Image: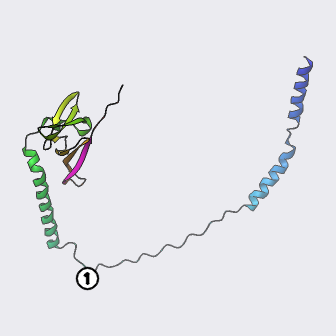
Amino acid sequence: MTLPRIATVSLVLLALGGCTASGEGELREWMASERAQARPRVTPLTEPKQFQPVGYEVHSEMDPFDPMKLTQALRKESAQLASNAALIAPELARRKEPLEAFPLDAVAMVGSLKKDGKPTALLKVDKLLYQVQAGNYLGQNYGRIIAINETSIQLREIVQDPAGDWIERTTSLELQEEAKK
């Protein structure tokens, strides 16, 4: 072996010799004393409240099982069903237009113009171009075009709400500008 290697090996052995277990006893004593001093602080739980049942007093409140109340609720529901049917019935009776076969997210407005003095929108669907005016139908939710301007089309749609009732809502289709390549 050469002198630098011998010096390096002796330094490593000397350093490892300093890592003996001489301070381990002190460390164990300190850990034991810390464990003895540390006490968890737990707050006691409060006693649960006693349940007091309350009797149902029929003479002071409305009877939930009253046949008249049930009859009124059924009449109100049937009137609501009739109004819902009146909203959707004309849509079901008319002939569908070609653009009603496509969802709104598949339709893109690519321009607008005036044709015979009426605003007309240019729509692109599946690489085909369509011209629509106010009164035409669009989309799968009975969407009727109510207004057209240079940058958007306003639609009135008839959709079902979470309760299953038919309601009207307005939505718009905005002008889509294609990115230049």
Side of 54 relative to 153 (left or right): right
Q: Judge left or right: residue 110 versus residue 54.
A: left
Q: Who's the residue at 22% across and 50% down the image?
A: 170
Task: State which quadrant residue 79 falls in.
Answer: bottom left
Name the residue at 15% across, 43% down.
Answer: 134
Q: Dot 1 lies on which element?
A: loop
Please state the horizontal and vertical placement of residue 77, each as a whole percent of the image. 15, 62
Colour convention of the picture: rainbow
Point out residue 65 in the picture as x, y percentages from the top left corner.
Answer: 20, 72
- Give the residue at the far front of this rendering: 117
- Residue 55 as seen in the image, left or right of residue 36: left
Q: Amino acid at mark 1?
A: Ser
Please say if 78 is above or below 44. Answer: above
Say if 154 sits above or below 77 in the image: above
At which x and y percent is residue 176? Answer: 29, 36
Q: Which residue is mark 1?
A: 60
**26 or 4: nearer the viewer:** 4
Q: Look at 21% across and 34% down and name the residue there.
A: 123
Extreme-top residue of the structure? 1
Front-lying residue, 77 or 139: 139
User: Which residue range is magenta in the image?
Assistant: 166-174
Q: Is residue 167 magenta?
A: yes
User: Which quarter of the figure has residue 82?
Assistant: bottom left
User: Around disc 1, counting alpha carbons within 10 Å, would you say few (fewer than 14), some (14 to 19), or many (20 or more)?
Assistant: few
